[in-house]
Image (tube, rainbow, N blue to C red):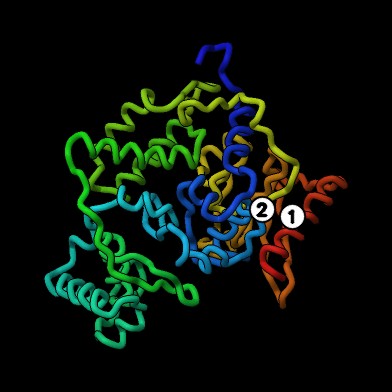
Amino acid sequence: MSPLKVPSLQQLRRYAIARSLFKPTSLPRAIARLGFVQADPMRAPARAQDLILAHRVKDYRAGDLERSYPDLAIEEAFFINYGFLPREALALLHPRGAPRAWDTWDAKMRARADEVLAFVRERGDTHSKHLQAKFDHGRMKRWGGNLNVSAHLLQGLHYRGMLRVARREAGTRVYQAIEHPPQDDSPEARPARAARLLDMVVQLYAPLPAASLGYLCRLLREGVPHLAVEMRQLQEHAKSRYAHVQVDGLLWFWPQGENPMAARHSVDDRLRFLAPFDPVVWDRRRFQLFWGWEYKLEAYVPAHKRRMGHYAMPMLWGEQVMGWANLKVVNGRLQHGLGFAGGQRRRGGAFKVALDEALQKMQEFLEL
């Protein structure tokens, strides 16, 4: 891109918002367009995946993804994080090398895993309670907690591609056995698979500062360790694969064929409460570059140390994120608390109208 056609930081910001917050569509089309929807079990006031989809799916209601999941061509899987992705992308992840925790299992734990897989294959749809009724696996110390071994085995088999999530019951995964067709593991095919995976994350989070692209490549090397070498090579040659330019001294990347300066990248004046994992705000490095302040999710920070609140949701109004909101449902009613970056509270009538509309839409989404 010539010096005369270099986008400004403001244009990159507008481009990031407009390409991610596309016109609401159907649930399958929204997931296909995003490519990946990060999931989180915390409800504050709804799960992250529902909060993300609410802005991109017409007439979406909390829980629609879980209710519709069995009928959609999508899968729960670990990608760069845990979430939902189109079924056609699942084959790109497998065969996946075992996580380190799996490698350190002793012969007894491996035998248990084989036992669990055989049980699921014979039984069909399996809930962790079915395993607990059949086997006495007990509990184990892991990641600072006391984990149910049966649930841990199911999750490990799911990660390795031997199980899939068929549906959820009251939020708990129900698994079924799966076998993936053999993959072309030739020297030509492996880089192509790695490239498709990297394209997915660039498509989801662009435009990306170079440091953020590097971080995503590291996450992908953890998510698909069998393609780690190919992912590292892709990162080294990112300039030949993606559009890129220096803006204010920083190198940025986005998909080829897109123009961040195009007039069609317009942003409406709606106010939106964004989940901490929403693609618009997921990259905290980019967030600070775009809006000039540091945003953190403090759900796991001790209450007395929180600056923004338990589940502060960035508050996007037009192109600006001037602060955050903490939302919760008490006795069937939505309550909200607002915080503002720099302590500058917005008092104008336009802001109040936009806030009231956003709160009304949140109540409809939560079916209050």
Residue 214 occupies quadrant: top left
* Kind of residue sitting beneath label 2: Phe
Q: Residues within 10 Å of mark 1 (few under 14, many from 20)?
A: some
Q: Residues within 10 Å of mark 2 (few under 14, many from 20)?
A: many
Residue 118 occupies quadrant: bottom left
State the SS at label 2: strand
Vertical position of residue 242 compared to residue 337: above or below: above
Residue at the image position 52 percent from the left and 43 percent from the top: 284
Residue at the image position 34 percent from the left and 42 percent from the top: 218
- Gap between marks 2 and 1, in whole Å? 7 Å
Is 336 left or right of 227, judged from the image as shown?
right
Residue at the image position 59 percent from the left and 62 percent from the top: 310
- Can you give x and y, in whole percent of width and height, for residue 141 in the image? 29, 73
Q: How many marks?
A: 2
Is 332 left or right of 241, judged from the image as shown?
right
Q: Nearer the viewer, residue 87 or 114?
A: 87
Q: Quadrant of the C terminus?
A: bottom right
The tag on residue 358 is 1
Do the CB atoms of the residues marked 2 and 1 lie less than 8 Å apart?
A: yes
Vertical position of residue 319 compared to residue 343: above or below: above
The tag on residue 271 is none
* Kind of residue sitting beneath label 1: Ala
- Can you give x and y, in whole percent of width and height, for residue 19 in the image? 58, 38
- Can you give x and y, in whole percent of width and height, for residue 319 in the image? 69, 38
Q: Nearer the viewer, residue 90 or 144?
A: 90
Residue 87 occupies quadrant: bottom left
Is 136 left or right of 254, judged from the image as shown?
left
The residue where tag 2 is placed is 273
State the SS at label 1: helix
Residue at the image position 61 percent from the left and 24 percent from the top: 261
